[in-house]
Amino acid sequence: MWLAASDGVYRVDDETSTIHHYPVMMDGIATRVISIAEDDNGVIWFGTQGSGLIKIAPTDNPAKDKVEYINSKVPLNENVITNVIYGGDNLFWLTTKSYLLSYNHENKRVTRYTNSYRTGTLTYTLSSGGYNDGMLFLGTTNGLQVIDTSDLGINDYNPPVVITSVKTQESEFLFNIPNGDDESVLFPFEENSVEFSFASLDYTDPTKNKYRYKLDGFDEEWRQVVGISNAVYTNLDAGDYVFIVQGTNSDGLWVNNSAEFKFIITPPWWFYALVIGGTGLIIILFLYFMNRRAHFKQSRAQVELLRVRAATDSLTGLANRHEFKQRLDDLISNDKGDEEFYLMFIDLDNFKFINDSIGHTVGDKLLKIVAERIRSVIREDDLLVRMGGDEFAIIIPSKGNVKEIKRTTERIRTKISDSYLIDDNMISCSASIGVACYPHDGRDAETLAKNSDTSMYAAKRLGKDCSYFFDEELSKKLQETFMISSRLPRAIADKEFELHYQPKVCLETNKVKGFEALIRWITPDGQFIPPDKFIEVAEQNGAIYELGEWVLNEACDQAAIWIKQGIMTGHMSVNLSPKQVSQAGIVDIVKSALKRTGVPAHMLELEITESVLLQNVDVTKRVLKEFTDLGVSIALDDFGTGYSSMSYLTEFTFDTLKIDRSFLFNIETDKSRLLVLKNIIQLAQDLDMGLVAEGVETELHAEMLRGYKCELYQGWLFSKAVPADKATEILINNGIGSDAA
């Protein structure tokens, strides 16, 4: 049995239940596998979200099987393969998010189909296809698509390319444009800024036509654009020029013809004046007044140019933050009837990683392409702005209903998430989008922009590559977060926090073997604020460092008291957040707490969650090794809650594995959950790791864990987390055995 996972592929032997993991990596980062197919020879093929198409030829010894990356040998030009479907005779049918491809493994031929079978805009869903007797069945966001593969073909249409208009400051040619065989058109020097519009007459899908153009006499190389059908040249010197443009059809094939326009910029009037100068006072005065008139026109043009530059982003050519603020203020101040409009904030996901790993030059080119893609799917009266960095904004006048806005948002998200080929680098990019509506989500520019920005960050917290519309629930959560964030510093100073201790109990003897220290916030008026409300806020505003150090010292102080009383010989467990693990000097902070209280290092256990292992891997490895060298125990908390990978257990050193409470939900009737729990326990035992099951609330839970030889448990079956005095009573009445871990 083969299983696709977020960190590669797993091969499960049905008879022995042994599992072999094949990691799938892209630039050192684990890649998600999303579709599986098997060919006539038993070779397994996988579609991935980042590494393209891969295959594994299984043998009797899985350890010798090799993962072969097809993209490194065949120019698929696609890193995201949503479906892999085997059609027989070495032919595979592949889908990306938006396109259908065929791949013949025997001759390595790749064929991309774009327009011959599609109607409208659709996105192929993950692992939702099938093939039978020449018919393809594909799941899309628009429902099931059925394709007769015998009807598929490549668009080899060779459309003509035409120049549709030529404009200068004073002249304009429309439709009847002189071609390359005609004589050159003369333009006076005052008309030395020329705009060309052109088209490739393929109407299948004009948005996919590509163009390349150059101006002989000015350009040294061809300029290539997608979805843009005009070119502007300003301040040309006097001379002869030929504008040449070529295009593709809608399947990206370059056509064999081109369009040309010849023209001449004549020298300025003062050139001739220099030649015939000295003809008298009248001519000199005439030239003087002509010069003043020209200077006045030029000054007006320069003022206009400066105004445009002040409102334009220099990299993308979009409106900038200054123009955005001006337009937003104008819309709100001129509104007389609460007319709706929408404000959309767009932030590219993981753009910093692209800049740091590939370079700022590629990052700048990516921003330009993203701007072009967004501009291609919005209306002319929608204002697209680059706010700075990797953040864009769009002011969208009312479109009538929110459904149309949601469709526009999804088109933008889908357009951005298509892959990019920049300087031979295949780049995957996505965006998080937040939307707010005037006047419902803010009646002034500052509030509306803040709520749109907040919605965008809400989309990031939902997993990125999605959109979020501002609503009352988000508003309430923001108010709650703001309240907690503003009260945290004072609460720490006023010592409103206290530690509660939950026993870790031996399943065989029912003896307490240690405690986990858990922080509690109780306000002066007796209000209890749960940790899941304030811990995340503390991590965001940096209070977690002071709070975490207080928890460590408080727990060690209490452990020292119990050790001195002779009633505790087990572990005192303290949780470390991801921020603390990467905190400079965290090892010295732990050393200081142990030295000050006299608690032996082996009696302190530090608990970290799996999310820590995904951040700053090298730093985490170093810090955990220093803790181990110090003698402190390390526990992996909440194992199996979303980031689990067997490789963590071999790449990092852990003394204890804590099974998340979610594995005990409905365990009495859910056989699959029970099987996973059993295998986790067996895995920990095989790796000689300590084991603690969390969330044990019934005797049936305890009995099942006891049968699987689980060592310790925590849960309300024995005791919830209690204050220090209650925990002392538990120790005195129950006692910790001399064999405590």
Image: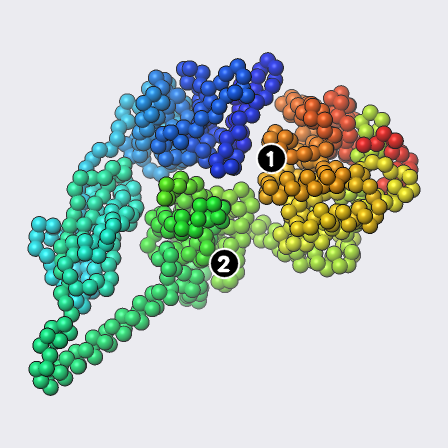
Q: Amino acid at mark 1?
A: Gly
In terms of depth relative to the viewer, which is nearer, 300 or 649? 649
In terms of depth relative to the viewer, which is nearer, 72 or 136? 72
Counting from the top left corner in percent of width and height, residue 560 is at 85, 45
For label 1, the SS is loop
In terms of depth relative to the viewer, which is nearer, 242 or 49? 242
| Crowd around label 2: few <14 · some 14–19 · many ≥20 (10 Å) | many
Tell me which corner region of the image, top left, top right, bottom left or bottom right, holds residue 340: bottom left
Q: Of all residues shown, which one is farthest toward the top?
A: 15
| Crowd around label 1: few <14 · some 14–19 · many ≥20 (10 Å) | few
Q: Residue at x 79, y 34 (%)?
A: 504
Is residue 83 visible to us here?
Answer: no
Counting from the top left corner in percent of width and height, residue 82 is at 43, 31
Q: Is residue 169 left or right of residue 313?
A: left
Counting from the top left corner in percent of width and height, residue 500 is at 80, 44
Q: Of all residues shown, which one is farthest toward the front?
A: 629
Q: Residue at x 21, y 62 (%)?
A: 236
Is residue 685 visible to us here?
Answer: yes
| Circles 2 and 1: CB atoms closer than 8 Å | no
Residue where numbered disc 1 is placed = 642
Q: Is residue 403 above or below residue 642?
A: below
Q: Residue at x 74, y 50 (%)?
A: 589
Q: CA distance from mark 2 to mark 1?
A: 33 Å
Q: Is residue 664 left or right of residue 435?
A: right
Q: Amino acid at mark 2?
A: Ala
Q: Residue at x 10, y 82 (%)?
A: 278
Counting from the top left corner in percent of width and height, residue 431 is at 46, 46
For label 2, the SS is helix
Tell me which corner region of the image, top left, top right, bottom left or bottom right, holds residue 717: top right
Residue where numbered disc 2 is placed = 449
Q: Is residue 604 left or right of residue 10?
A: right
In primary-sequence order, the first of circles 2 and 1 is 2
